[in-house]
Image (cartoon, helix red, strand yellow):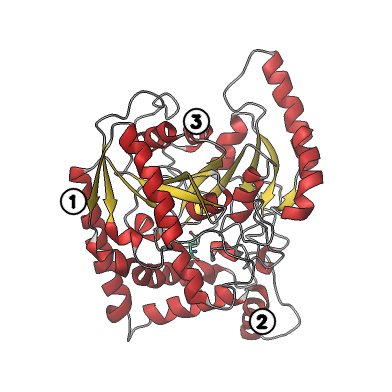
């Protein structure tokens, strides 16, 4: 009830939530009370949570912040929702996002723009801006988001919360509405690293319904926190301090790095030379996969359907013309172009090759370092409207996070300090399945 009251009081200003599930929340809270009274208590029993509206929730409208799915009520839960429900969480709502997770500011939602709780004239980041803002504004202690090129870490940085993108394959994508399937991962937003580890404990694990799910030994991510980080080796890739990273952000990250020095870590500058190709690689691979994934919205199987015609082709055309917003259309066109017969080798195949080069550079770096530390985003949260008309400057917001998805690595953004009076994030990148290492380092910083 306290959280629902808080939502009532604050969310009209922030607009983090797409759908409020207050009745369900009270019923689940009652169940949790009963469980607790019976002595059946786990870490997350009775804990309120918000899900990004890209995650299917049985019986609860799931829009992807698109007109296309305005009235879509999934008949099943995403694997992560199922797992958290079985642990007794309380679902308070679904979070606003950029349409189909395409964007870095939540301004691409077909419904409304979420605001940054630190300054409501600024964006909360995106695409999981609603989830990040919900946690930052105290609407729930935890939320889930999805991250294809930075959509958990960048809004976490902008809203000064903790956001983790797990290793590709650690968390099941079953029931996550697909954007770019080789890059998408689900992960938690929380106020601190310890809470983040608790949510990861609940959502990580093999799932045969996701063909890219990787079996891993059961791990207690919470249990690994604490203890010394002395002697750990941290690489600081110099390319992450170029390309539009402001002097103020750079200075804040330098200050944060001194904390690790004081904790006894060895800090060393390193180089990942192909970093500057990552954005181009991403904007070929992600739209290509998106164009294929979004072909399913044909007005027949799901969601919006234009009916006022006898022609099947016109029905399909109109459904997609009306149902998709401008950014989604831009991605479909980019992807269709890159995959078309005459251009496939020049664009898509080339991008895949460069993807491998980027991955190998990370592999080489991780032979020398336990983790890499970078800024999460190149700037502080920008003003609503500032980049909305210029897709390329919006795309640059993910310059520090995109390489991590390209290589499938785990990355966490923690509160790194402030620049220009606004929060900045510190990104810690680990080897595949080394979530323990980056959580431990993040925890030590806090
Ligand atoms: N901002 C990037 C994009 O628009 C990343 C989005 C994401 O991670 N879902 O594609």
Q: CA distance from mark 3 to mark 2?
A: 48 Å
Rendered residue at 46%/57% (across/down) = 150
Find disc 2 in the rendering and name its residue. 318
Q: CA distance from mark 2 to mark 1?
A: 49 Å
Q: Position of residue 193 (x, y in %)?
A: 49, 35
Find disc 3 in the rendering and name its residue. 194
Please, what secondary structure does the residue beneath circle 1 have?
A: helix
Q: Is residue 230 above or below residue 7?
A: above
Taking depth in this image into account, of 104 and 284 the one nearest to the observer is 104
Taking depth in this image into account, of 70 and 59 the one nearest to the observer is 70
Please, what secondary structure does the residue beneath circle 2 have?
A: helix
Taking depth in this image into account, of 18 and 84 the one nearest to the observer is 18
Q: Position of residue 244 (x, y in %)?
A: 41, 67
Q: Does residue 213 show up?
A: no
Find disc 1 in the rendering and name its residue. 364
Taking depth in this image into account, of 266 and 215 the one nearest to the observer is 266
Q: Earlier in the sequence, mark 3 or mark 2?
A: 3
Assess disc 3: are there few (<14), some (14-19) or many (≥20) residues with their C-alpha within 10 Å of its C-alpha: many
């Amino acid at each position: 009830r306290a959280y629902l009251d808080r939502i009532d009081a604050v969310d009209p200003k922030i607009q983090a939530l797409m759908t409020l599930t207050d009745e369900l929340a009270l019923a689940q809270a009652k169940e949790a009370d009963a469980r607790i009274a019976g002595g059946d208590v786990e870490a997350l029993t009775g804990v309120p949570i918000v899900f990004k509206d890209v995650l299917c929730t049985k019986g609860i409208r799931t829009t992807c912040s698109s007109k296309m799915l305005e009235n879509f009520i999934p008949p099943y839960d995403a694997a992560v929702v199922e797992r958290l429900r079985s642990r007794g969480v309380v679902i308070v709502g679904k979070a606003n996002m950029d349409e189909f997770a395409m964007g870095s500011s939540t301004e691409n939602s077909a419904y409304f723009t979420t605001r940054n709780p630190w300054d409501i004239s600024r964006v909360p980041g995106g695409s999981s801006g609603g989830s990040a803002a919900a946690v930052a504004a105290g609407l729930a202690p935890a939320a889930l988001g999805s991250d294809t090129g930075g959509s958990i870490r960048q809004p976490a940085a902008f809203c000064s919360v903790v956001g983790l993108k797990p290793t590709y394959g650690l968390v099941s994508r079953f029931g996550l509405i697909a954007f770019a399937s080789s890059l998408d991962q689900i992960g938690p937003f929380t106020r601190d690293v310890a809470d983040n580890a608790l949510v990861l404990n609940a959502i990580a694990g093999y799932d045969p319904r996701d063909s890219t799910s990787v079996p891993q030994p059961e791990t207690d991510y919470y249990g690994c926190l604490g203890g010394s980080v002395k002697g750990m080796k941290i690489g600081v890739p110099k390319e992450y301090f170029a390309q539009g990273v402001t002097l103020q952000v750079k200075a804040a990250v330098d200050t944060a790095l001194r904390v690790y020095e004081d904790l006894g870590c060895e800090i060393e500058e390193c180089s990942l030379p192909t970093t500057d190709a990552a954005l181009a690689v991403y904007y070929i691979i992600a739209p290509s996969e998106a164009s294929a994934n979004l072909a399913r919205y044909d007005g027949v199987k799901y969601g919006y359907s234009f009916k006022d015609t006898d022609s099947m082709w016109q029905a399909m055309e109109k459904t997609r013309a009306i149902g998709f917003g401008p950014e989604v259309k831009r991605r479909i066109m980019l992807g269709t172009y890159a995959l078309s017969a005459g251009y496939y080798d020049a664009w898509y195949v080339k991008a895949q090759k460069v993807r491998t080069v980027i991955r190998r550079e990370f592999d080489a770096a991780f032979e020398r370092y336990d983790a890499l530390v970078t800024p999460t985003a190149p700037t502080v949260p920008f003003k609503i409207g500032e980049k909305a008309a210029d897709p390329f400057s919006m795309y640059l917001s993910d310059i520090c996070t995109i390489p991590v998805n390209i290589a499938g690595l785990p990355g966490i953004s923690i509160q790194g300090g402030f620049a220009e009076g606004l929060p900045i994030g510190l990104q810690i990148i680990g080897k595949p399945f080394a979530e323990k290492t980056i959580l431990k380092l993040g925890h030590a910083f806090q």
